[in-house]
Structure formats: C-alpha cells, structure tokens
Amino acid sequence: MAPQDGEGTTNNANSSSTAAAGYAESSDSQQRAGTSSGGGGGSTGNASNASTRRTILGPLRSCLRHSCGCDYDPTTEHLDYDYTYDETKRGSKPQPMPRMRGRGEYYLDSFNGEPWGCSFGTGEENGIWMNSGDQAGTIMAALVWLLMLYSAATVTLLTITNGIHPLLGMIYCTLVALSLSSHAKTSLTDPGSVPRTAVPQETQRRDHTQHSMCGQCQTFKPPQSHHCRICNRCVSRMDHHCPWMNNCVGAANLKHFVLFLIYTWTCSAYALAVFGWNYFFCGDEECTFHVIVVHLVRVMTILCVGAFLFTSSMLMNVTYGIMTGIGTIDRLKKKATNTMSQSDEEPIPLKDVFGIAGYHTWPLPVDPVFDNYDVVMGHSTPQRLSREHQLMERRRPELTPDLVAAPTMEMPQCVNDFLPV
C-alpha cells in the first residue's frame, strides 16, 4: 500500500473503514434502483432478503475485522489498479480508474515489479531469493531441518509404540511443521534488500540535507540498513546475518524469524515437559518406552536442552531489539563506541513486524501486509512515485523501465531529481 503524498505505502484504518462504507452505500443504492425498476413481487422479496442479510452480516463482518486487527477489507476496498488488465479480452471495455484518496490517506499499489525468472540468488535479477554462496550457512540450515525431522520421527515412534498418547504426538508434529515452515520462509524471503533505484522518502528529503550512500552497492542507504558481505546486498533494518537461516534477518522477514524462534522454543519446552512427566511422575508400565526408542529419546533430550537455551537467548535478543528499535549490529557498534546512552531510536511497532492483515495471520508464516511499506523499508522508488503521479493526474499508468545503477559513485540523474537541491 502507498500514501498519496509519497511518504510510504499501505493502508490507514480510519480511511479504510470510510472507503468500505462508501462502497457499501453505493452497492445498496444500485441494488435498490434495480429492484424498483423491476417492479415484480419476487424481485422485491429478493431485495428485501438481500438487504436483511447486509444489515445483519455487515456489522458482524466489521466487528470480526476489528477484533482480528484487520484494518482493511480487500473485498470492498478496490483501491488498486490492475496492471495486467487486457481490454481486448474484456470487449474493449476500459478499466475503471481507482478512487484516489486525499492527502494522508493510503492506497494499494498492486504493481509487481519483481523478476519472473526462475533463478536462485540474491541479485535483483533473480526470481527466487536464496543465498547459495555460503556453504557453511547451507550446511547449518540443512542441519536444522535434519534435527527437527529427527525429533518428529522420535515422537512418532513413541506414539506408535504407545509410549505417549497419540494426541501429544500430533501436537508436537504440528509445532514442528510450523517451525520448519517459518524456517523456510525466513530462508527464502527477501529480507528487505535495497534496490538500486531506491530514493529517500519525502520526510527524509524534507528533514535531512545529506543522505548516506553504500560504497559497495553505490545506492542510497536507508537509516538502520547495513551491507551484508555474504548476501552482497544492503538490507533494510538489518538485525544480523543468521547462518542457521542462511539468510539475513531484516525488515521483511523478521516476522518469520520470530515465529521460528517461538515454535522451536515451544517444541523444546513441550518435549522436555512430556519426557519429564514420563520419567519423574509416571510409574505405570504403560509409561515405559520401548528399548530402542529410549536411546532416541536420550539424544533428543540433549538436543531439546540445547535448543531451549539457544532459542531463549535469541528470543530475548530479538525482543530487546523490537522494544528499543536497536538491531544486533547497531547495538554492538554502540557498545564498542560507548554510545548506547545516546541512542534516539524508537521502538518498532508490532504492525511493522507482523502487519495489519489481522491478528489471525500473526502466528502463521505468511508474508505480512505492512501499514506503511516505505516507512518500514526506509526508502521509496522512482517507479512507484511515477505510477502514483500518473494515477493522481487520472492518466493510465505507463510501466517505467528498470533503472540501471550508475557506474560511478554519483547517484543516477533520475534519483537526483528526487533529492533536495
């Protein structure tokens, strides 16, 4: 989502509800007009039933969205422009222009500027994000899957041999599946790499006369971003490069990393609780494990203790970073220079980590919908600003070509146009 004043992207809760109400009223008026023109008794009855359903379900749906933390309704707020719309397949019917919102309100920028190539890597030309240049990180990431699958197999054998109740095994395997899904999303998600065409936001251009630039990428370097030598990219709000994920942890995949830590910590604590109950509090013969499974359980217990301690430490580290707004790299730099007391960073809002698509999406490893994408990433792009400008002038957006980075240390001319004089 993107604001019309060029300060970032996505949706505003108050303006969203207003837009939804406006569309609902328009739909109701059209339905009433069609009913009156029909003139039939059956049409009147159908319209009455439809109106009753809207009267009952409308407030209920709105209440559910509000209770789930979902600030916008994509089924009613058609604020995006379909860039794949083909008039030749729609009977030469032009696409209606989206309703432009006032200053301070946000709209949905649905343009997909990502590469479509089926290539793996961390470059802008790669369609699938994967760090394949770090062999040690690849081995460590694969080791995570091996150990998690080993623990799931051990618990499954306990269930088959009647060592534990099947429900307990089902719960553990579900937690393992969620943990591995979060690990895969963390590893294969762009952590927030800064594109070559990145430019400062409007507030940054207004409040600052000088902006940082990355010497390796030769692009604008947003605040709290760092250049990763392993991924060879600048990453927005980079916390650290995690070898267990074989990827950087940044603004775009922090949610998946937090979920992985939570689910792995829960798996370890859950397994230790089940084993501890069986060993210390259960004296029946039904609690005796199979001879072969006992050795697997002993190895798994050692792994669970190590995973519990490690994830506990990482969870405290990430929680501290969210509460203070200072990432791991920045914190180490400030401690080395004795400037922690001079920190002026703000805490990171949870909506900038888990998104605004609703509380029901927070525990699931799905990509978050940010309330203000440009603010979360710390930069904007000339392409998006150009599309926004064309839409505000009620013109059909023309897809701007990708801008090539300048071969010198100077910013490209198209980027200088957006910088203050």
Image (cartoon, grey):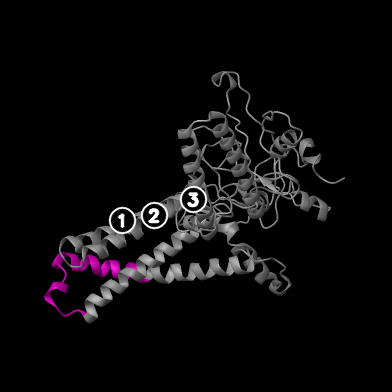
Task: Confirm or deny contact between disc 1 and disc 2 (CB under 8 A).
Answer: yes
Q: Disc 3 designates what residue? A: 57
Q: Decide: few, some or many residues near mark 3? Use Cα within 10 Å; few <14, some 14-19, many ≥20.
A: few
Q: Disc 1 designates what residue? A: 149
Badge 3 amino acid: Leu
Principal secondary structure, stretch drawn in magenta: helix
Badge 2 amino acid: Leu
Q: Which residues are magenta?
A: 282-305
**Could you say which quadrant of the image residue 278 lies in?**
bottom left
Local SS, label 1: helix
Residue drawn at the location 74% of the way across and 32% of the way down: 394
Badge 1 amino acid: Leu
Q: Disc 2 designates what residue? A: 180
Q: Earlier in the sequence, mark 1 or mark 3?
A: 3
- How far apart in space, not on screen, are marks 1 and 2 (Cα)? 9 Å
Task: Confirm or deny contact between disc 1 and disc 3 (CB under 8 A).
Answer: no
Q: Position of residue 345 (x, y in %)?
A: 69, 66
